[in-house]
Structures are given as structure tokens and as C-alpha cells.
Image: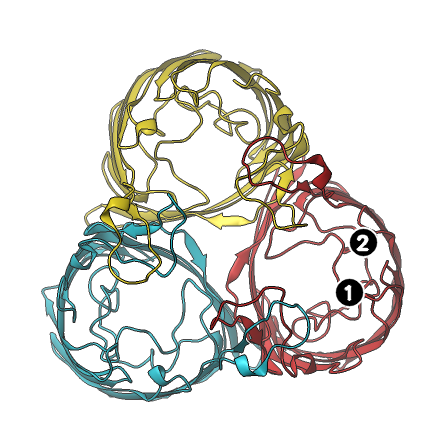
Chain colours: A cyan, B yellow, C red
Amino acid sequence: YGRFGLDWNQANDGLPNNTDEADAAGEPSVSDAEETSITSRFRLTFDASTETDGGVTVGGRIRAQAESRDGVAGVANWSAPQFHVAYGGLRVNVGNIWGAIDSAPGLYLNTTSVGTGIDGMGFNSLAIGNGFNWDTFTSAGNGRNGVEAIYSVGGFTGHISYSKQNDLYESDGTDTGPVAAATRVEGEERTAVMLSYSFGDYFVTGAYQDSNVVANDELGFFAVGGDFGQFGATVSYGTTDASDSITLAGDVELGAASTIVAWVNSADQNTAAGRDGTAFGINYEYDLGGGVTFVAGAVSSHADDNENSVQAGLHFSF
Amino acid sequence: YGRFGLDWNQANDGLPNNTDEADAAGEPSVSDAEETSITSRFRLTFDASTETDGGVTVGGRIRAQAESRDGVAGVANWSAPQFHVAYGGLRVNVGNIWGAIDSAPGLYLNTTSVGTGIDGMGFNSLAIGNGFNWDTFTSAGNGRNGVEAIYSVGGFTGHISYSKQNDLYESDGTDTGPVAAATRVEGEERTAVMLSYSFGDYFVTGAYQDSNVVANDELGFFAVGGDFGQFGATVSYGTTDASDSITLAGDVELGAASTIVAWVNSADQNTAAGRDGTAFGINYEYDLGGGVTFVAGAVSSHADDNENSVQAGLHFSF
Amino acid sequence: YGRFGLDWNQANDGLPNNTDEADAAGEPSVSDAEETSITSRFRLTFDASTETDGGVTVGGRIRAQAESRDGVAGVANWSAPQFHVAYGGLRVNVGNIWGAIDSAPGLYLNTTSVGTGIDGMGFNSLAIGNGFNWDTFTSAGNGRNGVEAIYSVGGFTGHISYSKQNDLYESDGTDTGPVAAATRVEGEERTAVMLSYSFGDYFVTGAYQDSNVVANDELGFFAVGGDFGQFGATVSYGTTDASDSITLAGDVELGAASTIVAWVNSADQNTAAGRDGTAFGINYEYDLGGGVTFVAGAVSSHADDNENSVQAGLHFSF
């Protein structure tokens, strides 16, 4: 799909911050985005699948995606591939997996960006934070190599995912002999499980992630939601090492083509890195037909200063 | 499309020049092209567009392009995307725009490479120089983020384009606090306009670019041209900060499948960086059918020494 | 196509080796693969060709390929393109060529990976070594720029290929004047020829490469093979600067869908870098239908320690 629009973001006000590398004389490298800039994304998805004589589906997917944000244009980048084997209600993915946490119903908003506005606008509505410190399909990078199994029957879905990175060691630059065992930095290992049940227009879901990295360990998510005619509502609770938070999101259909989604998140930080306070946002979409949607959004983030941003633009499917 | 052929270029004679970085001992990095080498390009274009219920076209384009020049083979690289919204005679592009200057009729030659030979051979025929210091669609890089509007009615076309890069600042390497405001290097801001009118087999066009970078400011272009049966001719005048020049280009159709384009450019430099003197070239094309064209070209550039080059090869469309 | 599976490799036992660059403090960079990891590849091929009015085919090919090996996930990378012109039994390729040595019948195994298991498992069956120091189509990198001609008539095929890299020089970092001629490192120039003749179910082939790099010079290959109903066998002999070796490979069809390929290679080293001793392997494939194949392989390499590896997984065509 493609999407493009204008982004006005107070967080781009003022001078940018120093980085941890000094520039060579006369070659400045810290980019200062204007408050108003173009935000866009162009995503190509290559899907291939086939079916064996025994009725098992075997396939793969890869993406190339280009993004422009904060005044910096980007070329497209390839993703790593995801492979799958599916039979009946069971599907096993290998490679660039979706992740059990990321697949929990009620985690993302029911909008074209699955957040607010054109590009998600920071995804402050997520009850488990916007650090994306769980496994998720990476559309323009190598992501993490994982394995996951998803089983669906009736309204029930069970999902378990596992990923592991190689350990890293320091090199002494000699090009000879093995590295020193004491310099080991353990590669992150994540195991996550998600259970979900939907009955009629209602659903309930719970998810949990275990990791050997403290900041990503004991991540929990719980949500319930339902549709009541033209209204819908979801309550979700998330707990992470950095903060705990609760999100209330509601959507309403206006006439034949318009949808409004509004949300508020209240967070309590457990560590200095965590989000604290209240964030809220509103997203408006109008279906123009032919797969084209007009999208506008406004967000007030958890930040104390320069917390406001507004976006408007078009999203088109292909 | 694809194109490939042999390039013989006197400018590759002799030893290459030093670069501004010294090599590590025993790891030479300056490549010395032979006078004769393979020149080729392979371009994939991904276009997607849809139409809303109101008849507005919304779409996007992205490219992947591989080039081999001067004995160095290259892999394909993605471009940044261009998005468009079009209705009737009006089209608005966002992202990797075409640019008003680059779209002026009479700027490029009427050949498969829009220059001479297989790969354009330096584009010395352009009256505004071959520095490409104006906005243009970048096929294998991130280009510049811009916005442009094009309006066509009858034989008239008006085109206005605007692009802006972020300001840059130097980092002090501390990773804390904002950068020093005094280290600001202003991002380039370009505004360009092009007007063109065609009547029967004749056209007239004028274009102008304003920039906050002196070398790219006050760039002007003017051209008139026409077709007289099997003959055609274009006169174009360009003025830039570096040099002013005038180009005369003529083409003649020989029989059913052959076309010859010949051109001469005379330039007066305003600064030491500008082109000075006379360049000329000739391009021959033979249509082999099925979208395959045999192309041969010869160019004598503005340079005082080693100014000659010759190319021949095939261009095929897909 | 896509392929993915599990790799168990003794060579990943123990600590990895130091590299020739020391890590910055606290930023280890040497990755330690587990003995068991995911191996996968996803390959997209873009082919384009057209035919002139005179019946000459003109076309091109480019690839994007992603691989995951030894616990490191990779994104897709583009290749450089190959262009071709073909008429009757003659085909000329330009750019990312196949190479005469690499095209010799009997060099690779008759399996989905053209080696053993999912990813070839080191290609220890090749009689000319697994250094790939001959021209071959590079699927995810820029490869080498070459030209080759292939002529086939009846059961006879003749193939000659040539590639040349630019010379390299050291830069003194001054950014002025030509480089010092004495720092020249000559670019590699390879010329290879392959002749092959097949008659009924038998074939015989010979190939030879000349290079200005000693390690890649005087590379020779000779093979004979045949099919005898459900059995097949190939004997191949290779001689390189580093080692001489002989490979015996046999395949047998079991029932309608299963194939077993077994091979043994015996090498004598000429230099310390060469392979020495015996390697052997076995590959099992079961056709699941729909282009999906179950593949399993086991290899014992030429190494003295940790020489065993096993792989199993799926290969699917698209």
C-alpha cells in the first residue's frame, strides 16, 4: 500500500540534540526536522505459496518498504522473509515471525495505520508501550529469526512464538584464536504466548512474554472489547518493566463512509525510562472509494512539553 | 527497461586521481577504469494507482535500478517513492518529484537515453549544465522530498515544484543537550517553475529555479523547437551561476527505422567550475522491432584533453 | 524459490575466532552461532526478454535474494543484472555472467540445492573446491562484470567466458594529482572455456580457467556420467592451485517420489590452503507435490574435527 500526508509535530520544535559521535570539522550531521514535514510510506509485499498433494500450504513472504519521516526521504529497503507451513487451523511460521504479543487482538487500534493518523504518530495508544521490545514482523530490516505456531478453532486462537539471537563476543583484533569467553554478551531469547477468544461481537485476549533481557521480561497484556451496533469499545491493560498502563479506545461510525476512533492511555512508570501520565488521540477516516481513504489524526503524547502533533493525508491500497 | 553496450572513453586514460582519504597500508581503493568498458542499466518500475468514487486518481511509483559504468558492476538500488493525486488536467506529486526544470521540453535530446549513446555520455548537450543541481526523479537513491503541481490544458503546461532539505548541525559528541545553533548549515530550498506551449509541430518553453544555495540559484532555461517533416530542430539557452550556454540540436529520420540526432553546445563560464568552450555529439538509432533499439553515439566534451568518447549497444523496453 | 529448514553443524561448536579488528569497549561484534540454527533462502527472479523483427532474443535478468544462516537473519539484496542476446543455438551474456566453469555438467549435484541438504552444506562435493574462485552468477551482490558466449548444437555445447576487474591503486589522501603507479594491484582477469557432449543418457565434459591470480590459475575440470534406469553415476576430477581431487556421486530413485544422492570426494592438497583427505555426504528428497520438496542431508567435510553436519527442511518453487 501507499500513504502520504503532512505531519505537524511540536516535538520537532527547537534545536536537535547532540549525538554520541562528534562530527568532523565542517561536516555537520545532525538533521533538524521542521515542525511540519511530509510523512509517507510505500510498501510492496511479495507473497508466494503453493499446496502439496497432501493439502499442506507452504509459502513465503518478503517486503520492500520506503518511508519518509521528519523531512528525511528514504529509499525502499527489503525485509527478511517469513516462511510458513499451514494445515487446517494450524500455521507454523519460520524466520521473520509475527510474534505472539504483536498478534494480540485489542493491542492496536482499528485504523488504517493501526495507530493514529498517517504513520501511527508514535503508537502511544499501546498499553505495553511503544518500544516494540517484542517480536514483530519487520518490514524494512532483518528483524529477528524466530519460530511460531498459531492454532485457531471456532472463536479460539492460541499463539506461541520463540526467537533467539546469537551471543556476541569482543574481538581482540589479532585475527587468531578464539575470543575471550568472559566478554560474552548473551543474545536475547524471547518466548511469548497469546490466547484469544471471540464470541459474537465480543473478544477477550491475554498475552505474556518472557525474556532474558530484564527490560523486556515479564511483559503482560490483557484486553476485552466489543461492538455495539455503530459503536465499539476496547479496554486494555499492559505491564512492562518500565511502566504499567491502561488504554480505553472507542470507535463510532458516522454515516456510510466516516469512522472516528478516540483513545486515552494512562501510564504509571516503574523506572525512569517508562512512560508516565496521560496521552490521548483521535483519528478520523473517510472512505473515498477505490481503496483510497482520507485519514486525519491528532495526538497528545505522554511528554510534558511539545506533546502535540497533527497529521492528515491519504492511504491507498494496492 | 534494459540497456547495455561498450563504452570507449578517453577520459579514463592515464592514472586515476588521489582521493581525500588515505588508504590503509596494502589496501588500495582507487579504481582505474580501462578506456573501454561495459556500460549497462537495468530498471524495474513498480507503478500502482487507483481511482476514488469521485474520479480522482491516487497512486505511487518506485524504482529499482542497477548500473555498470567504467568497469564497476553495480547491484540494483531502490529509489524513494513518488505519490500522486490527479484530476482532469491537474496532477500533484509528493515525495521523489520530477521537478519543473527537469520536465522542460527541449532540455533533453529526443533519444532513448535522452542524451547521447547508451548511457547519455555525460549529458553535455544540456544548456543548463550536467550537474543536475535541480530537482529530478532519482531512480536509485533517496533524492529530495518535494511537492509539485502540473496543470495541462490544450497545448499549455504549467509546472511548479518545491523541495526542502532539513538544516544540519554539528554534534559535539556528548550525547546530551541541544546542538550549538552557530554550527547550522542551512538545508537547500528550491522553488522552480516551468511554462510550455506547443502549437502544431512547434513548441516554446521557459523555466526558472530559485535556491538558497548560490551555485543553484537563478537557473534559467529557454527553448524553441519544431518538426519539419523528416527533420527537426531545437535551440535552447541556459544560464546558471557557473556558466551560460546555448545548444543547437537537430534530428533527421533516415528511411523507416533509422534516426540521427546531432547537437552542439557552446558555453561561456562565469566561475572556474563552469563549462567553457564547445562540445558536440551525434547519436544514431536503428529500431530492430520488439522494443529493441540499436544505439551508437560519439561525443566530444567541453574538456581540453581526452575529450572524446564513443558508445554502441542495445536498448530494450519491458 | 523459497527454502527453509534446520541446520545442525559441529563446526559451530566452541567459541568463535577473533577478527582482525578490535571492538570498541563494550561493543562486542563477533557472533557465536549455536550448533543448531535456522537456514533459509528466499529468491525472487525478475526476467524480461523481447524478440526483434529479425528473430533475435534480447533480454535481462536480475535477482533479489535473502538468506539466513548460522542464526543471523538477512534481508534481501539485489544482484547485478545479466543481459543476453540469443539467436538459434548461440547466446551471448553480458554483465553478471554464468561462467564457463560454473556451467560444466557434472560439477554440481543433481539436487534442489545443487549441493547437499537445504543450503548446499558447504558444497564439499565439488571436485574443484568450494572457494568459488571462478565466474558464477552472483544472486545477492555485484559479482563480476563479464562477457560470455554459449553455442549449442545437437548434444554439443561450447562455452567461453571472460571477466576483468579494474586495477586498484592506493590513495595518498591529498585529493590532488594522480595516484602512484607503483601501488598498482592488478585487477583479476579470467578466461574460461567449457566443452560438453551428451549422447543418449551419457555425457562427458571438460573445462579450464586461466587467471592472472595464481590461486585461480590453471583450474581444470573433467567429468563423465550416465543414467542407467533408476540409477545414475558421475565421476569428476578437478585440479586447482590448492588441491587436486576426485568425486564419485551416485543417485537412485526409490519409488515414485524419493531420490537419494550419495557422494564421496578425495582430495590431495598442493598448498596449505587446500583441502586434504576425504569428505562424503548423502541427500534425500521426497516430492510432496505442488513444487514442494522435503530435503534432508548429512555431510562429513574434509576437516579433521567437528566435521559433521545435518540439515532437513522444505524447498518450494514459485
Q: Nearer the viewer, mark 1 or mark 2?
A: 2
The foreground one among A123 and C285 is A123
Q: Say which residue label 2 marks.
A: C216
Q: Quadrant of residue C286?
A: bottom right
Residue at figure coordinates x 42%, y 54% from the top left: A76
**Residue A133, placed above or below residue A305:** below
**Residue C192, placed above or below residue C254:** above
Q: Say which residue label 1 marks.
A: C108
**Residue B44, placed above or below residue A272:** above
Give the quarter of the figure containing the N terminus of chain A.
bottom left
Q: Chain of mark 1?
A: C
Query: Given the image, on which type of amino acid does mark 2 rest?
Result: Asn
Residue at figure coordinates x 56%, y 74% from the top left: C31
Q: Chain of mark 2?
A: C
- Sequence-first tag of 1 and 2: 1
- Asked whether the viewer can see residue B261, the reply is yes
Q: Residues within 10 Å of mark 2 (few under 14, many from 20)?
A: some
The foreground one among A313 and A16 is A16
Residue C314's x, y, as percent? 60, 76
Q: Quadrant of residue C183?
A: top right
Residue C88 as seen in the image, left or right of residue C38: right
Residue B249's x, y, as percent? 46, 14
Q: Residue furthest left?
A: A254
Give the quarter of the figure containing the C terminus of chain A.
bottom left
Residue A153 as seen in the image, left or right of residue C275: left
Q: CA distance from mark 1 to mark 2?
A: 19 Å
Q: What is the secondary structure assignment of the residue under circle 1?
A: loop
- Asked whether the viewer can see residue C252, the reply is no
**Residue A165, placed above or below residue C195:** below
